[in-house]
Image: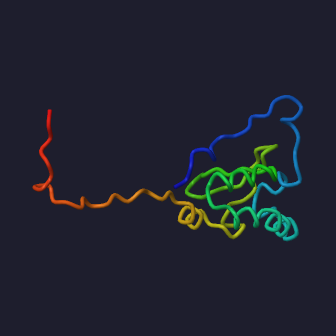
Amino acid sequence: MYSKDFERETHTTGDAAMQQTAWSSASDQDRMDTEMAIQLRILLTPHFQDATTWSELRSGLQAKGFYMKRTKGHMHLFDAQSHVGICTCAFLGFPYKDLEQRFKRVRPVRKAPTRPMAAAQPFQH
């Protein structure tokens, strides 16, 4: 299941808050040119493919200067420095539903009691 850890953002203040990266200029999929989209996919695909948990994916993206945030039923990719939304993860080929299915939490399975309740010894006070 989606972890609220993705909601944590780094708040930048001072001169650093005004900086932009090459990725922040592609704040809309309509403005992202083909070359930029290919570069972004090449840069981030290994992290999406190799991650086995939400935490691993988040760490990999943070190392490259990005973070994800769920909005309007989609997982969006943001530039970590300018906090500008770049595109959805689906645009990169990794729809949120697929990620959620892959990273779902494994819940422990409780085994049925091996002996019938009638045969169990009564509770002693």
Is the C terminus in the top left, top right, bottom left or bottom right quadrant?
Answer: top left
Residue plotted at (76% across, 66% down): 46
Viewed as shown, does residue 70 lie left or right of 81? left
- The image position of residue 17, as x and y in percent, is 83, 35
Residue plotted at (56% across, 49% down): 3
Residue 8's quadrant in the figure?
Answer: top right
Residue plotted at (55% across, 53% down): 2
Image label count: 0
- The image position of residue 88, as x and y in percent, is 68, 60
Direction top: furthest residue: 14
Nearer to us in this view, 121 or 97: 121
- The image position of residue 121, as x and y in percent, is 14, 48
- The image position of residue 59, as x and y in percent, is 72, 50
Nearer to us in this view, 94 or 34: 94
Residue 77's quadrant in the figure?
Answer: bottom right
Residue 14's quadrant in the figure?
Answer: top right
Viewed as shown, does residue 99 lie left or right of 89? left
Residue plotted at (60% across, 52% down): 70
Colour scheme: rainbow
Nearer to us in this view, 121 or 9: 121
